[in-house]
Image (spheres, rainbow, N blue to C red):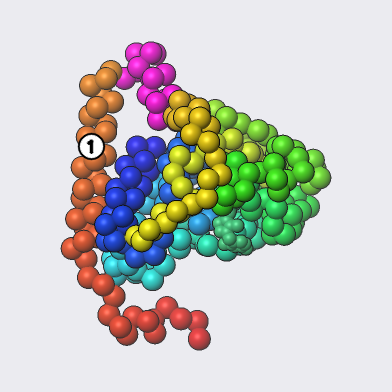
Amino acid sequence: MLRIRLFEERASRLIAQSKLPGVLHNSIGQEAETVGACMALRDDDYMTGNHRSHGHPIGKGVALGPLMAELFGKKTGVCRGKGGSMHLAAFSAGSLGESGIVGSLMPVAVGAGLSARLRGTDQVCLCFFGDGAANCGPFHESLNLAAIWKLPVIFLCENNRYALYTPQAQTTAIEHVAHRAKAYDIPGIVVDGQDVQVVYNTVSSAVARARSGLGPTLIEAKTYRYCEHYEAGGPHQPPNYRSDSEIAEWRARDPIEIFSTRLLRQGQLTQVDVDAIRMEVEGEIDEAVAFAENSAVPEPHALFEDLFV
Ligand SMILES: Cc1ncc(C[n+]2csc(CCOP(=O)(O)OP(=O)(O)O)c2C)c(N)n1
Ligand SMILES: [Mg+2]
């Protein structure tokens, strides 16, 4: 969780200094649902993300240097600098990709589940998507197909209450996305997305169910993004769409604080350990940034590589 938090805080500073191209969709505040879900997977399981997906490959165990280099557009990036922030993929870690087209990776996750079935493995695919994506066509098509074929897919809705600047209540007839599971005759579970252990336990059960051939589960993690919908190098004034008190309320339930306080209380960690972990991760981020900054940009001819046609 700290790797994601500090990676994104650093990326945020870098883009404010115009050191990164494009835009960033950070997930600060949402780390528990990402990590709790990813930790329930094996290394050879698959994962798909969306536009807000720096944390997903980090949760899946992808090294920070090549991820940071991808944000810089460098040739040592996970996609050789051609994808950037919204297209991180690392097949070696089962991270099948991310996309700025909302909902578009959901059918890919179903395809990964079908692939595992056809190859006779017990791999599963974890599919991250937002509350906004839950109102797109691919959501319904993906859940239906996965349900009738009992495919090993775990659909993880990261409900951060907003799609861009629109609150969920203005776009969605029901309060809990997970209740839509009933329409596909699969389990639907609402969890506290700020508690990494609750997410881990719930996703672990869904993974076990999927591995044993019983099919998909829809899990909805209630969470919140502290940051803006996106961050960019230039001036950017988002509309006034949420109150300071709402943000403060969610910050008071910070996922990293909740977990570290619990471990301190249980005597599993001391404050010295907590501080040491933070220092260690800060060092990892420094290294990742140095790796990215010292890497070369792709040569012009790289434009013509990795093309199907
Ligand atoms: C198909 C499609 N429609 C609209 C957009 C514009 N858009 C970009 S992000 C976004 C909101 C997505 O909200 P959600 O799925 O809840 O994810 P979050 O940003 O909250 O993590 C929208 C509508 C898009 N990129 N793709
Ligand atoms: Mg959302």
> Is residue 290 rendered to the left or right of residue 115?
left
Q: Magenta stretch: residue 266 in it?
A: yes
The answer to whether 295 is drawn above or below residue 219 in the figure is below
Residue 232 relative to residue 117: left or right:
left
Q: Is residue 261 left or right of residue 288?
A: right
Q: Residue at x 69, y 57 (%)?
A: 136
Badge 1 is on which residue? Answer: 280
Residue at 28 percent across and 25 percent down: it is: 274
Q: Does residue 56 show up magenta in the picture?
A: no
Measured from the top left, where is residue 78 in percent x and y?
Answer: 36, 62
The kind of residue tagged 1 is Glu
The percent coordinates of residue 138 (x first, y second) are 69, 59
Q: Position of residue 123 (x, y in %)?
A: 56, 50
Camera-nearest residue between 262 and 96: 262
Q: Quarter-wise, where is residue 218 in the image?
A: top right
| Magenta range | 255-269
